[in-house]
Image: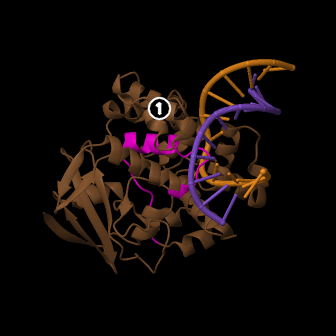
Chain colours: A brown, B orange, C purple
Amino acid sequence: METGAIPLDSVGPFDLQSTVESGQTYLWDRADGNMYETMSAHGGEHWYETVVPPLAGVSDERAVVRVRQVDDRLEWESTTDAVPILTHLLRLDDDLDAILEATPDLPLLERAYDEYRGMRLVRDPPFGCLISFICSAQMRVSRIHGMQLAMAERFGDSVDFDGRTYHAFPTPEQLAARTEAELRDLSLGYRAPYVQRTAEMVADGEADPAAVRGMAYEDAREYLTRFVGVGDKVADCVLLFSLEFLEAVPLDTWIQTAIADYYPECDAGGYAETSRAIRDRFGGEYAGYAQTYVFYYLRAGGE
DNA sequence: GCCCAGGAAGGGG
DNA sequence: CCCCTTCATGGG
């Protein structure tokens, strides 16, 4: 086991608990088993853990990573050097102060940024992110998370680390080999065939979420909708939380409420036009950061 | 029982 | 192109 600590003074504002528990990623778990339940002060000091697949340009092999925040540093334990992995997954390489500085001065955004100071977007592994958000349709965040844990435990590889057994998220091949009925047994409901068929598309090489790298934003969104169970909204989530399109603004129920209550002139009818309008309102380049803060803030009861 | 949850697919107009 | 219905499931 390797261990270490990342000092955050050179990283800028960072808050681990809100980053991992705000409903952007469903691929982490909290060691105490109380994910989404007890929230605590800055950082949280809870241990979070995940099994990370090989990441292009970051890590060649699968890794188990545990991390917690204690004041202004991240303590980690891992099968390997976790610094590049955590930097990648938790976007420690973002200049958050500069991003906030580039954001328009809107009262709702100010309140959300102030409430969750230090929350970052994530860079989830693409396949896990794609499946997570296919499962997200008409579902609460705690259940989406539970589905991903269940798929990992049932269909993913077992990985031993530090005297415990962890479960990697299934590969496209592992999910493609399951039947719709086996997925329904995990309470995926009508999402079961979507997950199975999308996994098959990836496993067979028919399409690849990572293929959107370098595409223009709206072309990338259009590309992702070829996957079964992926419409404009889920495509935007995958673009934002995995594939580096920080301008993506997923139009979920919460952000649509925000548009109706705060920015009604941005409601342009269709998804593409409304998305374009709210993206401009939120400053364009980093509009997805603003969206994610607003989503978490409103869902937690803010107004 | 009723309603809702980070929506999407399939059909018809 | 837009509008409508249907699709599981668990928790309040």
> Of residues A144 and A76, which is closer to you in this image?
A144
Residue A273 picture location, percent across and down: 69, 39
- The residue type indicated by label 1 comes to Ala
* Residue at figure coordinates x 31%, y 56% from the top left: A50
The question of residue A182 being in magenta is answered with no
Disc 1: which residue: A181
Q: Secondary structure at mark 1?
A: helix
A78 lies left or right of A237? left
The front one of A279 and A156 is A156
Query: How many labels were placed on the picture?
Result: 1
Mark 1 belongs to chain? A
* Residue A47 visible here: yes
A257 lies left or right of A28:
right
Judged left or right of residue A182, residue C3 is: right
Q: Quadrant of residue B13?
A: top right
Residue A18 picture location, percent across and down? 47, 68
Instruction: Specify whether residue A214 is in view.
Output: no
Residue A178, by quadrant, is: top left
Magenta residues, start to end: A118-142
Q: Quadrant of the N terminus of chain A?
A: bottom left
Is residue A137 a member of the stretch shown in magenta? yes
Q: Position of residue A176 (x, y in %)?
A: 37, 29
